[in-house]
Structures are given as structure tokens and as C-alpha cells.
Image (cartoon, helix red, strand yellow):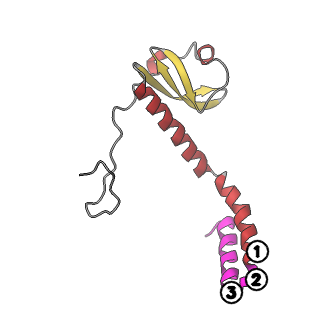
Amino acid sequence: MYSALTQAAITAIRKIATNPATRKQLGKVAATYGAKIAKSKLSETQKQRAQRALAVEMARQIEGGQLSYRTLLDGKPHTVVWADGTPIQAFPECKGDLEKKLIRHRRDLLVDPPEVRPKRSRAPWSRHRSPDDP
């Protein structure tokens, strides 16, 4: 039912609850598995979302800014910001001359950035309100 990672964490927590001398062991387990969690797919997904959000913000700020999503550069997907049909920057950053790499890229795949960020709805009784809320 549980993965090996979860099972090891549960075992370590149980030992700490029963014996205070095992706190050092928890530190070792936390250090070992903390690094694995930091390198997991979830953190990679968060990084990709952050990069995509930066590209969208940049495209919004540039007059005539457009985007191409999942553009393959050096074998990896990137979000590229374009201005008037010229590539400006790739997110995550790509080394080398973007214009040369994207000379044959189809310009009909470019899209305008979303106009406005969608607002997150909040319950009327929520204590966490943004400064923009009335």
C-alpha cells in the first residue's frame, strides 16, 4: 500500500515517538529522503510552471509579444517568447543563438499570451484575502 519511501518515514517516526535516543536517525532519514523529494517530478513540474509563468509575463510586457509552448530546443521542451516573429528568449534559458535554432520554426504555431490571469475564487468567509479584494 505504501511506497518504500513512505514506509521508511513512518517507521522512523514511530521510533522517535517511543525512544528519544533515535532523533539522530530521523535526521539522517530526513536528509536522505528530503534530497530525493527535492529532485522528484513534483519539484520539476513546479519549476516548469514557474518558467512558463515568467514567459507569459514577459510576452505580456512586450508589444507584439507572442509565445510558442513546448518548442523543442536541444531536445528539451521550452516556452519561447517572440516579438514580431523574432524569438526573444526561451524559458528555461537555452544557450546559443535562438534565431539560428528557430529559423525554420512555423510562425503559425505562435499564440498571443493570455490577457488576464484568472482570479482564484475564495470563500466569502475566508480570512486570507488579497489587497485587491473589496
Residue 123 image point, x, y percent? 28, 60
Is residue 128 found left or right of 92 in the rendered image?
Answer: left
- The residue labelled by disc 3 is 18
Q: CA separation, marks 3 and 2? A: 9 Å
Residue 25, placed above or below residue 88: below
Residue drawn where x is 32% and y is 46% of the image:
119
The single residue placed furthest to the bottom in the displayed view is 18
- The residue labelled by disc 2 is 21
Circle 3 sits in a helix, a strand or a loop, which is it? helix
Residue drawn where x is 29% and y is 48% of the image:
132
Q: Inspect the magenta stretch and tell me whether residue 14 lies in it.
A: yes
Q: CA separation, marks 1 and 3? A: 14 Å
Disc 2 residue type (three-letter): Ala
Circle 1 sits in a helix, a strand or a loop, which is it? helix
Disc 1 residue type (three-letter): Lys
Residue 53, placed above or below residue 133: above
The mark nearer the N terminus, 1 or 3, is: 3
Give, as a single range, the part of the protein colored magenta: 1-22
Circle 2 sits in a helix, a strand or a loop, which is it? helix
